[in-house]
């Protein structure tokens, strides 16, 4: 990684403007599927929802500059692929999304450092598991496995064409035993 000391801490309201600009650059320059505006809208939706966990929304700083952002939010599984009754069951699972690293700092280990610390914080808070949708080649290195191995299934979008992109991780061995359901994002307009 870099010579400077990376600080990962809970986000604060004063960070919001920096988070917006880093998400835009991260997605515009790092993906071919988003210009970042939908991701910013998703972050705002999550913050305004009952699923938001302020203590699990983080920024990474280098020399006082926000260079990364990620958050975990509660995510109830749906009992059916069509959705429904999702809000009534707390599965003890959190969703990791979105994850952004400032484009000037790509491929310097910041994402790995952020998520390693974040996963540990989720464990400490007693959640059973974490879901994430993304590049399986990256997330598999952090201990995530294809969600269907845990009885948790994608219902739409990219994971349906490439199921390995929908992943889960137990927080403790066996913590997802008996948990099953479907990933349905109908509570978010921008997901």
Image (tube, grey):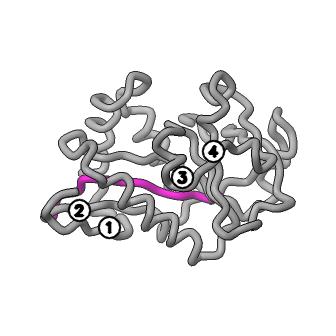
Which residues, given as a range, are shown in magenta?
64-74
Task: Identify residue for label 1.
Answer: 8
* Residue 126 appears left or right of 118: right
Q: Residue at x 40, y 41 (%)?
A: 40
Q: Secondary structure at mark 3?
A: strand
The image's mark for residue 96 is 3
Proximity of marks 3 and 2: CB atoms separated by less than 8 Å: no
Q: Residue at x 49, y 66 (%)?
A: 56
Foreground residue, 109 or 12?
Answer: 109
Tell me the chief SS of the magenta region: strand
Q: Residue at x 81, y 47 (%)?
A: 151
Q: Is residue 177 magenta?
A: no
Task: Identify residue for label 4.
Answer: 167
Proximity of marks 2 and 1: CB atoms separated by less than 8 Å: yes
The quarter of the rendered structure image containing the C terminus is top right
Measured in 3D between alpha carbons, the distance from the residue under mark 2 to the one under mark 1, in whole angstroms, is: 6 Å
The quarter of the rendered structure image containing the N terminus is bottom left
Q: Which numbered mark, 4 or 1, is in the foreground of this view?
A: 4
Q: Residue at x 33, y 42 (%)?
A: 23
Please tell me which of labels 3 and 1 falls first in the chain. Answer: 1
Foreground residue, 92 or 52?
Answer: 92
Measured in 3D between alpha carbons, the distance from the residue under mark 3 to the one under mark 1, in whole angstroms, is: 16 Å
The image's mark for residue 61 is 2
Name the spot of residue 127 as percent of width and height, x first: 66, 69
Measured in 3D between alpha carbons, the distance from the residue under mark 2 to the one under mark 4, in whole angstroms, is: 27 Å
Proximity of marks 3 and 4: CB atoms separated by less than 8 Å: no
Measured in 3D between alpha carbons, the distance from the residue under mark 3 to the one under mark 2, in whole angstroms, is: 19 Å
Q: Which numbered mark, 2 or 4, is in the foreground of this view?
A: 4
Judge the density around disc 2: few (<14), some (14-19), many (≥20) Cα neighbours within 10 Å.
some
Name the spot of residue 113 as percent of width and height, x first: 36, 60
Q: Is residue 144 visible?
A: yes
Q: Is residue 21 visible?
A: no
């Amino acid at each position: 990684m870099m010579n400077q000391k990376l600080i990962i801490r809970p986000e604060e309201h004063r960070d919001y403007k920096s988070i917006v600009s880093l998400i835009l650059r991260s997605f515009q320059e790092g993906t071919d599927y988003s210009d970042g505006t939908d991701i910013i809208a998703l972050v705002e939706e999550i913050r305004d929802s009952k699923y938001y966990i302020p203590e699990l929304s983080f920024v990474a700083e280098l020399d006082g500059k926000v260079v990364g952002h990620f958050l975990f939010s509660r995510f109830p599984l749906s009992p059916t692929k069509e959705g429904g009754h999702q809000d009534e069951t707390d599965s003890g699972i959190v969703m990791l999304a979105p994850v952004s690293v400032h484009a000037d700092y790509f491929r310097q280990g910041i994402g790995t450092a952020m998520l390693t610390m974040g996963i540990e914080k989720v464990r400490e808070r007693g959640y059973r598991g974490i879901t994430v949708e993304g590049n399986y080649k990256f997330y598999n290195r952090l201990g995530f496995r294809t969600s269907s191995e845990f009885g948790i299934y994608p219902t739409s979008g990219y994971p349906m064409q490439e199921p390995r992109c929908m992943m889960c991780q137990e927080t403790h061995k066996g913590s997802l035993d008996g948990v099953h359901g479907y990933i349905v994002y109908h509570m978010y307009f921008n997901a």
